[in-house]
Image (cartoon, coloured by chain):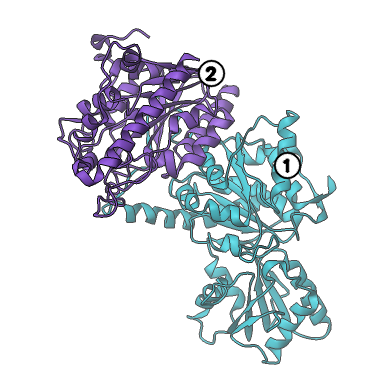
Amino acid sequence: MKIGINGDSAIALAWKQIDPDVCAAYPITPQTIIVERFSDFVADGEVETEFVTTESEHSAMTVCIGSASAGARTVTATASAGMALMWEMLGIASGMRVPITMAVANRTLSAPLNIHCDHSDVMSARDSGWILLFAENVQEAYDNAIMSMRIAEHPEVRLPVMHNLDGFILTHAIERMTTLDTHDVKDFVGEYTCEHSLLDIKNPVTHGVMDLQDYFFEHKYQLVEAMDASKPVIDQVFTDFAALSGRKYEMIECYRCDDADYVTVVMGSTAGTMKEAVDQLREEGHKVGCIKMRVYRPFPWEKIAAAVQGKKRVAVMDRHIGLGSTGPMFPEVCSTVIDQDSPPDVVNFVYGLGGRDVPVSDLKEVYMSMIEERCDKLNFLGVRI
Amino acid sequence: MKLSLKELSKSEQRLTPGHRLCAGCTEAIVARQVLMATEKPVVISQSTGCFEVSTTIFPYSAWNVPWIHTAFENAAATAAGVESAYRVLRRKGKVKDDIRFLAFAGDGATYDIGFQALSGAFERGHNFLYVCLNNEAYMNTGIQRSGATSHGAATTTCPAGSCIPGKEHHPKDMTMIIAAHEPPYAAQAAPHNWKDLITKANKGFEAGGPAFLNVMTPCPRGWRHESNGAIDMSRLAVDTCVWPLYEYENGKFSLTSDSLRIAEGKKEKLPVTDWLNSQGRFKHLTKDKWMDTVETIQEEVDRKWENLQKLCKL
């Protein structure tokens, strides 16, 4: 069914269709609509979910870890400062291998206080052992919420998943999208079975132990293996989802890249604007394309390396600045090309901080500065200096 | 609950020997008493601290029951998560057992860093018993002051100096703060009086909502007393009215056991100097220059004891 809906409500709708066992969350702009809409479904008895309205995001993530360890399928949502407050618990969730899924309505971090979009919240958690998915539009935000569960709960993965959607740009904007039948969603996600539930009193298990120098490294390495194992699982889930929905996703999406000399690498809603910039420049005769990264963790090394090979120049678009360094994606994309015989020149554009509008004209300028060799290694798109 | 040592000695060993707590530590004693207070299956949530690190060093575990630790400041929230899963999975028929939920946390994890999570869990009405193993300082990290540390006590962050005689502030009254949440049950206990403690833990397990048990848990290393002295310290805390035994049940406060007998004049109330002189952490207070501090501590103990007696008569 085609409906008009904003990104937050689309997440809440996906949750309603999934009917998770536990949702523990704390309200924060621009995530709030998710928990508001979902609490409507709880209040009206449309889901059986135990909805825990915690007193902080730290407790929200803690409740999620406790409930998931007790065998409950568990969801939550946050943004910005909320993620910062739960940051300690993010690594504990992945380290304890609980398949929580969390919607993140990407918003910048203070100071100065600002409620609008950039990726500084999720980027601060990029190494915390969570699988990270990004959405270009409301449809993808909805689809990611459903697919995340299958990825997280896969026995060879058992890692938490963050499915990101750009604050306000996607969370609050109403777009047209196609829903799935609730029955199909339930079938797709299936039943969750927990291997070592705390409620299995006949088989008591100690969760969250003290782990010293003699074992810690090996247990961390198991997370490395789980991240590696998630790649074929993600591909399979995307394939299965395509069979259900007709929408086929890939870890990266290459748009008009085949004969392009100049490409950008971009995540989130800006990918949509970037495609428009590519279309306009193509009409003007420029050989340009863009690579949208849907999955940022695990990082799709091989796919990025193959996609940028042979290009003249690549601009990595970071909606976050690693202060004192570059955007966080930049060195990672650079590292994919270091073994190539004649690697492309890779440059970095930091853009859209604090929700700064990113119009098509600005993105066209990114390409033109690459083509006309006017760009620096590190560029700040549109900032008034 | 009828209690006899003979019967209790036959109860299941939920915390097994072989853990690595210090000699003379009362945490294991308190935990074993609490775990004897119900025959129902128990799932435990525990904050970071001495008790957690000494019972679960991988690949060993001293726990014979399902047990979870996530972090320091969130034993209540972790328990709330497990209990929420239990509610929904029981509703869906996926879990059949009648389970009790228990959280163990130290005083730092309760009075200070974990207070918000504790308060939130009590406000939301999660059905679990929260036991504070109160040894009056951050013992796991080496005896730093907490909001539970006694006035005048020396710790490694409020040492007895030439200008400042140890901790300058009275401890928070956490049991009263929890009682102000108006839960079905809250109480103070001490391990020398096992019958009182187990009875209270049983009431907490069966309260049908959030229950709080604040237990005086002497620490030989932190308090600087002999390792065979912890039970004596527990007794002194009660007999000096530094740590009155009482409970808050369905909106009513009542003194229990020895504290009730002191209030009724059937047992002598000992001076606080008996308590202070028994422990190395108060040793500096015997100097003449800190006499005022000792008097202030006695006045504070007396003031709170009078207030508590009034509350219990209401």
Query: Do residues under tags 2 and 1 come within 8 Å of each other at their CB atoms?
Result: no
Residue A147: x %, y % from top left: 64, 49
The residue that label 2 is drawn on is B251
Callout 2 secondary element: loop
Figure chain in cyan: A
* Neighbours of disc 2 within 10 Å: few (<14), some (14-19), many (20+): few
Q: Quadrant of the C terminus of chain A?
A: bottom right
Quadrant of res B162: bottom left
Position in image of residue B46 (x %, y %): 39, 36
The residue at 30%/36% (across/down) is B295
* Residue hosting label 1: A36
Do discs 2 and 1 share a chain?
no
SS at mark 1 in the image: helix
Could you tell me the amino acid type at mark 2? Gly
Q: Which chain is purple?
A: B
Q: Quadrant of the N terminus of chain A?
A: top right
Q: Which mark is residue A8?
A: none
